[in-house]
Image (cartoon, rainbow, N blue to C red):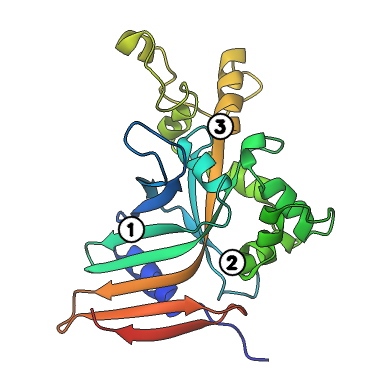
Amino acid sequence: MATALAPKWKAALESAIAEFPKQTVLQLSTLDSQPSPFSLTVAPRVRSHIFRSFLSPPSQPNLPLIHTTTDIRTPKVDQITSNPHTPVEVAWWIEGRQQQFRIRGKAVIIGAPGDPRNGSFAHWRDVVRGAQSPGSDAANDGQSTGYLGLKSLTLSPSFDWEQQRISSFKAMSAHMKASWCRPVPGTPLEGGQEEAKKWPVRLEEPTPDSSDEDKKNWQVALNNFALVIIEPVFVDLVDLAVIPNRRFFYERDEKGNWEEKEVVP
């Protein structure tokens, strides 16, 4: 049996990141179905995210997952978990390479165990492991072709999502860790800047000698910390560094194989 290969778009993206390691800011777009004063129907929402890493199932480099992180209290979490059939899209411009990657795929939120804001992920995980019957559209969709990589990695005996979440949190800077101790993002700033000055500025992993307050803040921050995992199924790569410019579509089939097609830029 032929060995599955990583898709060409991933190789191009990894090469660009290796050359320009600070160009890891991507734009993540979701759909918001909650009415607002400006929109009575579905509206797009976009925000900047930091790329953390690629994750791939063992022996299946053709099924890469994009790993980024968030605060589980943010609106994007509900937008993703309440619309499990709706894809998200990433737009990522690598200035140093003059390349744009538009990546479409399914996304899941992985928060602290037992957190109801995990949406359907916990049930989905149990379904693919055979511990529960599907029982929901979201869980059934989790077994579809849109989640081949996520399913394979979840079933891997050597991988654990909670360990990944904790290690990702510990890898953050002390300043970033402290940001998960703040009040709910986007809510009114009660008390103004004077109150904000009371928030923790740095958060170090507690030791047995740490204060109760430091231990509490660590646990609060860790509980608010969540992974955003995106499983790409379509990638649009534009290369403006060459003349004439080039553009490629990469589309994944139901077996996880990628088809490359060159198109007009």
Secondary structure at numbered mark 1: loop
Mark 1 Cα shell of 10 Å, populated few (<14), some (14-19), many (≥20): few
Between the residue at mark 3 and the residue at mark 2, the CA separation in whole angstroms equals 27 Å
Question: Which residue type does callout 3 highlight?
Answer: Asn
Q: Between residues 112 and 174, which one lies in front from this camera angle?
A: 112
Question: Label 2, on which residue?
Answer: 146
Q: Are marks 3 and 2 in contact (CB under 8 Å)?
A: no
Residue that appears at 27% across and 73% down: 238
Comes first in the chain, label 1 or label 2: 1
Disc 1 or disc 3, which is closer to the eye? 3
Q: Position of residue 195 (x, y in %)?
A: 37, 10
Residue projecting furthest to the front: 40
Which of the two labelled residues, at mark 3 and mark 2, occupies the earlier sequence position? Answer: 2
N-terminal-most mark, 1 or 3:
1
The secondary element bearing badge 3 is classed as helix
Q: Where's the C terminus, which quadrant?
A: bottom left
Q: Is residue 168 left or right of residue 185?
A: right
Kindly identify which numbered label has been placed on residue 224.
3
Q: Position of residue 80 (x, y in %)?
A: 52, 47
- The residue pinned by badge 1 equals 21
Secondary structure, mark 2, is helix
How many neighbours does mark 3 have within 10 angstroms: few (below 14), some (14-19), or many (20 or more)? many
Name the residue rendered at 57%, 74% in the picture.
61
The answer to whether marks 1 and 2 mark residues whose Cβ atoms lie closer than 8 Å is no
